[in-house]
Amino acid sequence: MSATTPAPTRTGPGGPSPVTPGLGDLWRRARGPLAFLGGLVLLAVMLSLGAERTNEGVLDPEGPNPEGTRALAEILRERGSDVTVARGTEEALVAAGSGTVTIVAHSHRLLPEELDQLAGSPGDLVLIQPTTQALDRLAPGVHVVDRAEAPGATLSPDCDLPAARTAGEADTGGELYATDGETEAVSCYPSGDGVSIVQVPRDGGVTTVLGTGAPLTNEHLAGQGNAALALNLVGERDAVWFLPDVPTHAERATLWDLLPSALLMALVPFGAGLLLLALWRGRRVGPLVTERLPVVVRSFETTEGRARLYAARRARDRAATALRSGVIERVRPALGLGPEASPESVVTAIAERTGDGPEQLRALLYGDATEEGGDVPDDSALVRLADDLDALEGRLR
């Protein structure tokens, strides 16, 4: 049962009339929910700002981290060059033109067909530590021969390439290259048996191969002649910074494809067990909820209401259990027994007090499980049980 609070009324000449809440009442009622919603909005805004992240990949022109190249990209823009960041092959091909230079990093992420498309693009190319496949397609005749003993070491240009000769010493120690002797090439920054920068002609432009990207990064750009080398290689042209994403294939394995077949077979009995558990537990009545009643309910009304529920559900066994437990709880203190007394001790104490047989008392107080259909098969048996229990309780008083 639940009670509803009647709306406040005002008594007037024509009888009681409802009181209309004012603005103050409305504000007092609404300020709590509004403050809660405002707090949620503020929390969502703060979380969205904290989740905002910038790219911090290696040689990423948008990365402010030491391995990024954001400083170089900003310097190029300040000099008037248009720097386009492309993360897909199609995007890079659209942005490339005859008067641009395309800087290719992470060529290991490019598929063979993408390298072929890039080889036919107009303008110059700058390859940063390319793979063997990238060298074969974009810089034919150039191959890797060694690596510098100290990666990032400072080397002298020792060549006739204006961009390198003007920059002077730079931190170009990395992979070392050589040409096949038949390719017209300009080699700079020698170390050991190879050079760290090679420039070869290609259809529609030239390809410059860098054995390391260290001179372009934020960490090393201000050292030696690194900044001058990077700016001289680009010149006053627009730059397309091609940083390809990891390639994805259309046909990818799903989670179900990766699971072993034995696990999939085990899901069938597991699901059946969950279904049976849900059916078993779902039929149970939940626990009672204690609630303060708005009115006082007399005890006999509660008893009658519960009795009607038992009668409607034909729960004679449950009613018999309630009658027996009630009698046992009431007579146990009179017998000097505690709440944890066993059924045998209760039956023995009552038998000594009344002189009745223990078997008869056990059947009366705890039920006779030997009878087919239970010891209360019908309503008349339940009435007889209630009379017998009442008579026994009366003799024990």
Image (tube, rainbow, N blue to C red):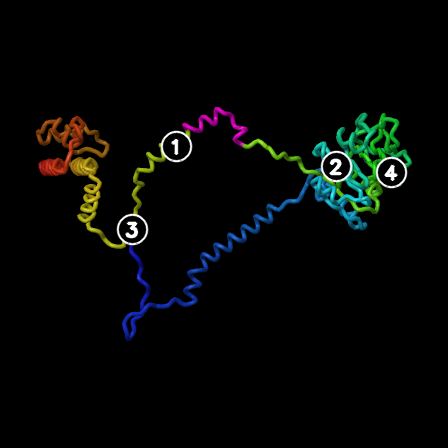
Q: Between tags 3 and 2, which lies in front? A: 2
Q: How far across and down, in percent of the image, does residue 141 sit?
A: 83, 29
Would you say 361 lies left or right of 205 here? Answer: left
Q: Between tags 1 and 4, which lies in front? A: 1
- Identity of the residue furthest to the right in this view: 160
Quarter-wise, where is residue 126 in the image?
A: top right
Q: How far apart are marks 3 and 2 (CA)?
A: 79 Å
Q: Is 257 part of what is drawn in magenta?
A: yes
Q: Which of 177 and 56 is in front in this view?
A: 177
Give the labeled residue for mark 3. Answer: 292
Query: How many other residues sit within 10 Å of disc 1, few (<14), some (14-19) or many (≥20)?
Result: few
- Residue 318's label in the rendered image is none
Q: How far apart are marks 3 and 1 (CA)?
A: 37 Å
Type of amino acid under label 4? Ala
Pick whichever of labels 3 and 4 is earlier in the sequence: 4
Callout 3 touching callout 2 (CB < 8 Å): no
Type of amino acid under label 2? Gln
Pick whichever of labels 2 and 4 is earlier in the sequence: 2
Type of amino acid under label 3? Arg
Would you say 30 lies left or right of 137 here? Answer: left
Kindly identify the residue that appears in the image at 81 percent across and 27 percent down: 143
Give the labeled residue for mark 4. Answer: 164
Callout 2 touching callout 1 (CB < 8 Å): no
